Image (tube, rainbow, N blue to C red):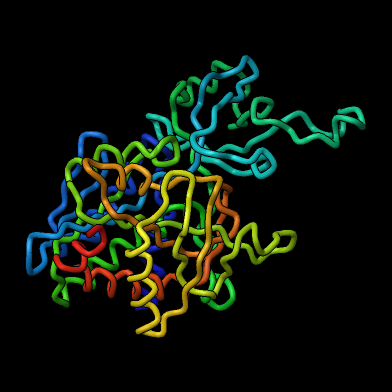
Amino acid sequence: MMEHSLRLLKELTEAPGVPGHEVHVAKVIEENLEGFAEVSRDKLGSVVAKKQGSTSSPKVMLAAHMDEVGMMVTSVTKEGVLRFIPLGGWWDQVMLAQRVSVKTARGDLPGVIGSKPPHILPPDERKKVVEKKDMFIDIGAADEAEAKELGVRPGDPVVPVSPFTPMAGGKVIMAKALDDRVGCALMIEALQRLREREHPNTVYGVGTVQEEVGLRGAKTSVSIVEPDVGIALEVAIAGDTPGIKEHEAQSKLGGGPVILLYDASMIPNLRLRDLAVEVAESLDIPYQFDVMTGGATDAGHIHLYASGVPSIVLGVPTRYIHSHVGVLNMDDYRNTVKLLTELLARLDESTVRGLTD
């Protein structure tokens, strides 16, 4: 099972998929769910996988976004370097000197994010953080004409380069796009496990598009599913590195799945939260609580659908999200798969009715 999870996470994280360009990730999801669920897509590109249980209702929607933070080419300068805009939230300090891949119609072009070197800056400017607007992507072209000959066009997506790498003997992994390919992997593994056990509902696993630029895929796909319950599968911000105060980010690698108590788009259904806690405690699954005041999740749109959908967010603690690399503990991942699968097995008609009665 460990090897299966590692292979799945490697396949998902190494697939390119910035907002609006998630097709490669969608293909990975579809291939891994073949024979496990009935798979389709909405018109924005989100993948919708239906797993019929012993009853057609309640309908449970699992949402994991396929897009990763990236960039888009906006223009080519006369020097042959590329100007760009961010797709998703980037912190300026983590961008410089990082490798990227420019996805052109003629193929992938390697590049590196550059700026004016500090050696020629006055002392006061050296101390300042370089802003994204002053950065560029160097693809090695001699001038604008050569860059265009190589196939670069405005609108081309730009993807971070960071290979999947096991750490600490395989207990910890390092990769790009863990936000939110880890959620996609959780959704896939939960649907695969449900094939071997009865569940009193119908589960829809949805890989959403364009979450990093406004939860857009969740808004369209929820109208296809029309769920009775929503569960967003996400990363959680790990707070176990130097300089982070406990109240700023409570979760830690190795501490188990995170049950989010609040994010900028949703306050979860407390009865659903209590059910997740009950399931975790009954199976001796470690768990953690956290809040995220500075970010939103797909549950933000799901819980507002129609007359309302009781929803919750489950996350895997992850370090360094919204950068070229994230780090997570595989024990947390496996425990989240277990908690999610067992929670799905308990969401029958009576239980779901009780979430809002």
Query: Can residue 97 be spotted in the picture?
Result: yes
Please tell me which residue is depicted at 59% across the width and 64% down the height of the picture: 250
- Image-quadrant location for residue 185: bottom left
Which residue sits furthest left?
A: 55
Q: Position of residue 30 (x, y in %)?
A: 23, 54
Q: Position of residue 72 (x, y in %)?
A: 49, 29
Please tell me which residue is depicted at 15% across the width and 68% down the height of the picture: 350
In the image shown, does 201 or 137 lie closer to the viewer? 201
Q: Is residue 54 above or below residue 177?
A: below
In the image shown, does 294 or 72 lie closer to the viewer? 294
Query: Can residue 23 be spotted in the picture?
Result: no
Which residue sits furthest front?
A: 357
Q: Please state the total of marks drawn on the protein image.
A: 0
Quadrant housing the N terminus: bottom left
Q: Is residue 73 above or below residue 28?
A: above
Please tell me which residue is depicted at 26% across the width and 50% down the height of the picture: 309
Quadrant housing the C terminus: bottom left
- Image-quadrant location for residue 21: top left
221 relative to 209 in the view: left or right: left
Q: Position of residue 128 (x, y in %)?
A: 81, 34
Q: Is residue 278 above or below residue 352?
A: below
338 relative to 346 in the view: left or right: right
In the image shown, does 166 or 194 lie closer to the viewer? 194
Please tell me which residue is depicted at 70% across the width and 59% down the height of the picture: 244
288 relative to 334 in the view: left or right: right
In the image shown, does 340 or 46 lie closer to the viewer? 340
- Image-quadrant location for residue 53: bottom left
Q: Position of residue 213 (x, y in %)?
A: 44, 35
Which residue sits furthest right?
A: 123
